[in-house]
Image (spheres, helix red, strand yellow):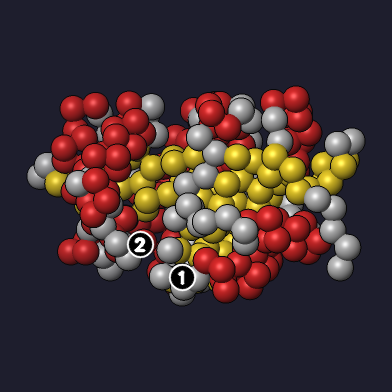
Amino acid sequence: MLTMPVRQLGESERRAVERLLDADPYAGAQVAERVAARGLAWWRAEARILGYGGRRNLESICWLGGNLTPVLASEPAVAAFAEQLAEEERLCSSIVGRADAVLGLWDRLGPHWGPARDVRPNQPLLATDAVPPVAPDPQVRRVRAGEVDRLFPAAVAMYTEEVGVSPMAEDGGRGYRRRVTELVRAGRAYARFVDGRVVFKAELAVVTRRTAQVQGVWVAPEWRGRGIAAAAMAAVVRDALARVAPTVSLYVNDFNRPARRVYERCGFRPVGTLATVLF
């Protein structure tokens, strides 16, 4: 397979990068948010963006920071990115993006970067632009600045359950607490409190001009099976559509059938399949 050389992109190619990100607004949302906030200069973005294609016809990009995220990566682009990255030490904590590109990268990078802690090959990517048909839970609201201490234990529980490791392990949780605090201050964290405890939570972890991406959805174990999740999610989606972005998106593990039923009830439709490799 003939491939073009991969190059690191700079600010002069920002418009070409933004055009690619607009062509894949859901799978590329995290990259789009960071490019909008910090541009393409690596010292500001704390990441590199690799490009595949000619200077007049950029075809694919690959974000390399805390996560490795390919966007619109064709098979030749995947091969070229992998050839470049195989010569480097792995610094990312995960590879996440469209399933075909992620799994193609992992097939090539596994011998150099392995082993992975977990590979999730089938994560439905869902989106909606309509108010949910489910009545919203009036007790779900944005978390206030003074409630971070109440929210944080639930956020840690969600992260540990979902990712398989505790966010407290690396630096005592300081970095993760900063992230939770940022989301609260930005009006992007939601919760339902009962007697001062969080029984439901979710965040708009990624926001672009095209979509608000929901992550961190969690129901307290003792409240599961009571049917609160659909109404709670409906409240989040309604607020996000009214206040933040024209669409709401998320991705979910294929084996999490209860969550998938909730999202279907809230009007989410499939727009692709992601995969994640966790280290």
Residue 150, position as x, y percentages in the image: 16, 40
- Residue 250: mark in rendering: none
Question: Farthest left residue?
Answer: 195
Asked where in the image residue 102 lies, by quadrant, the reply is bottom right
The residue that label 1 is drawn on is: 116
**Nearer to us: label 1 or label 2:** 1
| Residue in view at x 63 percent, y 30 percent | 40
Q: Give the numbered dot on residue 162.
A: 2
In the rendered view, would you say 121 is above or below 180?
Answer: below
Q: Position of residue 67 (x, y in %)?
A: 51, 50
Q: Nearer the viewer, residue 178 or 267?
A: 178
Number of labelled discs? Answer: 2
- Residue depicted at x 65% and y 64%: 105
Q: Are marks 1 and 2 in contact (CB under 8 Å)?
A: no
Q: CA distance from mark 1 to mark 2?
A: 16 Å
Quadrant, the N terminus: bottom right
Q: Residue at position x 76%, y 30% from top?
A: 13
**In the rendering, at what x and y percent does residue 90 appear?**
50, 57
| Front-most of residues 90 and 210 | 90
Task: For label 2, count other residues whose C-alpha is less than 10 Å away and answer few (under 14), some (14-19) or many (20+).
Answer: some
Per the image, label 1 sits on a secondary structure element best described as loop
Instruction: Quadrant for residue 204, please give it.
Output: top left
Left or right relative to 175: residue 13: right
The correct choice, above or below, for 175 with respect to 15 in the image is below
The amino acid at mark 1 is: Ala
Please identify the quarter of the rendering in which residue 58 is found. Answer: top right
Compared across the picture, whether 40 is left or right of 94 comes to right
Furthest residue in direction front, as rendered: 87
Quadrant housing the C terminus: bottom left
